[in-house]
Image (cartoon, helix red, strand yellow):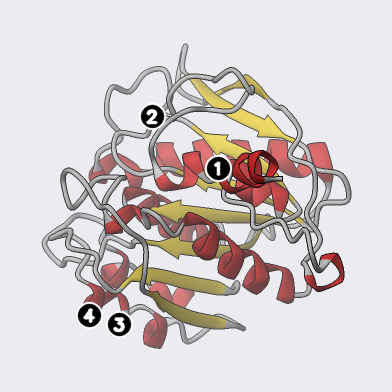
Amino acid sequence: MTRMWGFFKSRGIAFCFWSLIACPPLWAAQPGQLQSIASARPDAQIPVFFSATPNAAATLVLLPGGAGGIGRIGAEAWPDGANFLVRSAQMFAAQGFHIAVMARPSDMSDMDYPFRISAAHIDDIRKVAQQAKERWNVPVWLVGTSRGTVSGTAAVIAMRDEGLIAGLVLTASITAGQVTGAVPGQALEKITVPVLVVHHTQDACKFCPPALAKTIEPKLSASPAHATLMLDGGQNPTGDPCAALHYHGFIGMEAQAVQQIADWVKARKP
């Protein structure tokens, strides 16, 4: 029994052996595959890891932060990158979602802030979202973390009249005003889909002060549903406070963060 518990716990899934009725349903995270989608830019490809989940409530297009890498496809056929969204992708699948992890395009060495608000990047996101919609025909949500929040916010604003994106989740948002594309400085009043803001109270990244995360929601005047979750907890933060294995990346509390995001998304009816 101890060995079985360790197996599930290592994947961030709180499996209830003693009270199955009280547990939320967990879906089997299916192995996926890395595919390439042609960008509108000549000779550029967008690597995307797709994984289907039976009877999924929605598709989550995960937009990692940093330079946009997702690591390699590991032994269990999932990307092994350290980014919060990448290392939690199986947990999101286990909550009942199709998954599309969007990686850095082949013609870029770093997805910097200017690129993340560019028309070219937004078109890449559009192509991934369209592919996800064609595959599974369920609502498509964008979920960004750190620099990925700049991408997700810009894309939702630019595509607001297209009816393609059902909602937006912003985790560890870039909020510092001096940063190009910082979320509070974008045209948030133009967002017309549900938005969930998730931030760690101890996020020590200089580009993501928790106090400024609270300024996002009041600007979402056209969003039909919005909320801010300030989470606390986790353990053993290491390295750069702006990197994935610190509180900025919800280290040690991934399962809790995923559960709260999943509950909120599934409560939004199309």
Compare marks 1 and 2 and give the one earlier in the sequence.
1
Compare marks 4 and 1 and give the one earlier in the sequence.
1
Q: Residue at x 44, y 72 (%)?
A: 197
Q: Secondary structure at mark 4?
A: helix
Q: Residue at x 72, y 27 (%)?
A: 31
Residue type at mark 1: give it.
Ser
Is the residue under label 4 in contact with that under label 3 (CB below 8 Å)?
Answer: yes
Callout 4 crowding tier (Cα within 10 Å): few <14, some 14–19, many ≥20: few
**Residue 172: image x %, image y %?**
34, 61
Callout 1 crowding tier (Cα within 10 Å): few <14, some 14–19, many ≥20: few
Looking at the picture, tell me which residue is in the foreground, 245 or 64: 245
**Residue assigned mark 4:** 211
Give the number of the disc on residue 215.
Answer: 3
Is the residue under label 3 in contact with that under label 1 (CB below 8 Å)?
Answer: no
Compare marks 1 and 3 and give the one earlier in the sequence.
1
Residue type at mark 3: give it.
Thr
84 left or right of 142?
left
- Judge whether residue 155 can be spotted in this image: no
